[in-house]
């Protein structure tokens, strides 16, 4: 439960090794969170950045490819920390488009992680937040899903599906006291994106975390990181397809 001044007290991170997810958790810990659950395949070591007086950090097994286990993962987190103020959905796979085209099975496998894995665990988390009558599900989307580009359309199409799902889930939760915050970062230099060429208007994990914290404070439904991407993609979404095809090589 949030404290008397509205600060987040408990956080569940789905994707406990995600650099962006950990940056979000670190930011929330600096702002007062004192119960953290890191959920990842094989569990996860407790990162040194999560260090604050009175902080309790727990590790849970979580496999995005096993949807039948996802409700139990959420239930186990509740057993550890009680009500969940914030659930951060930050897991995913950023593969190589050429490799996907050469190996459709790998493309399908990673797409299942990047879309259907989120569907099952986010529905389970949303059910818990609805039952509590409060809490925010933070879903890490991407500008790759705003308009799919030819150089990463397998990943982008999964993010497009996730973005639409998260928006619909937010509408379904309206009036329950729980809500969804959709996060649309641009290029973020992390270990996961090290094989991707840098793009204009990059953001660091800390900048994405700041946008999330701001969105949580203001009750936003969607945040962009950096904010300039919002007006930029308002224009880019209207470009004729032949021009978009040339720009998105």
Image: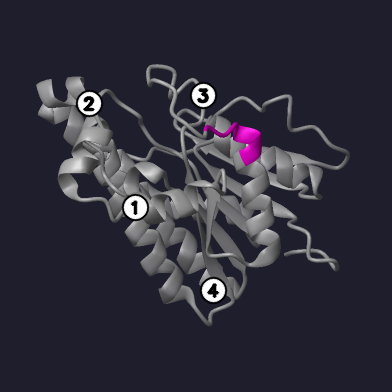
Badge 3 is on which residue?
190
Q: Locate the N terminus and report the quarter of the image it occupies.
A: bottom right
Q: Which residue lies furthest to the bottom in this view?
A: 175
Residue on which the image places disc 2:
97
The numbered mark, 4 or 3, whose residue comes first in the sequence reads 4
For the point 49% across and 34% down, the residue is: 40
Give percent across and percent down for residue 110. Answer: 26, 34
| Cβ atoms under marks 3 and 2 closer than 8 Å | no
- Residue 237 screen position, x and y as percent: 31, 53
- Mark 1: which secondary structure? helix
Asked if 4 appears above or below 151 in the picture, the reply is below
Circle 1 is placed at which residue position? 162
Residues in magenta, as a range: 202-207
Q: Mark 4 points at which residue?
A: 131
Q: Do the residues labelled 2 and 1 touch (CB within 8 Å)?
A: no
* Nearer mark to the viewer, of 2 and 1: 2
Q: Which of 135 and 205 is in front in this view?
A: 205
Side of 179 where 196 appears, left or right: left
Q: In which quarter of the image is the C terminus?
A: top left
- Residue 67 visible here: no
Judge left or right: residue 97 versus residue 188. left
Disc 4 element: helix
Graded by Cα atoms within 10 Å as few (under 14), some (14 to 19) or many (20 or more), the crowding at tag 2 reads some
Could you tell which of marks 2 and 1 lies nearer the N-terminus? 2
Q: The residue tagged with tag 2: helix, strand or loop?
A: helix
Quadrant in the picture for residue 107:
top left
The residues bearing labels 4 and 3 have C-alpha atoms spaced at a distance of: 35 Å
């Amino acid at each position: 439960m949030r404290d008397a001044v509205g600060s987040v007290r408990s956080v569940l991170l789905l994707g406990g090794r995600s650099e962006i997810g950990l940056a979000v958790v670190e930011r929330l810990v600096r702002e007062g969170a004192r119960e953290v659950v890191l959920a990842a395949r094989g569990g996860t070591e407790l990162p040194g950045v999560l260090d604050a007086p009175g902080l309790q950090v727990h590790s849970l097994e979580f496999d995005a490819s096993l949807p039948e286990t996802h409700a139990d993962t959420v239930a186990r987190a509740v057993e550890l920390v009680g009500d969940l103020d914030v659930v951060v959905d930050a897991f995913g796979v950023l593969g190589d488009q050429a490799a996907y085209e050469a190996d459709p099975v790998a493309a399908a496998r990673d797409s299942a992680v990047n879309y259907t894995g989120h569907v099952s665990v986010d529905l389970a988390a949303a059910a818990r937040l609805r039952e509590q009558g409060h809490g925010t599900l933070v879903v890490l989307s991407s500008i790759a899903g705003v308009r799919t580009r030819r150089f990463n359309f397998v990943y982008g199409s999964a993010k497009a599906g996730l973005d639409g799902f998260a928006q619909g889930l937010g509408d379904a939760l309206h009036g329950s006291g729980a809500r969804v915050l959709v996060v649309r970062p641009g290029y973020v230099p992390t270990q996961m994106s090290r094989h991707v060429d840098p793009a204009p208007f990059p953001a660091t994990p800390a900048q994405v975390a700041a946008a999330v914290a701001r969105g949580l404070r203001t009750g936003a439904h969607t945040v962009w990181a950096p904010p300039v991407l919002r007006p930029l993609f308002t224009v880019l979404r209207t470009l004729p397809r032949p021009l978009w095809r040339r720009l998105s090589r």
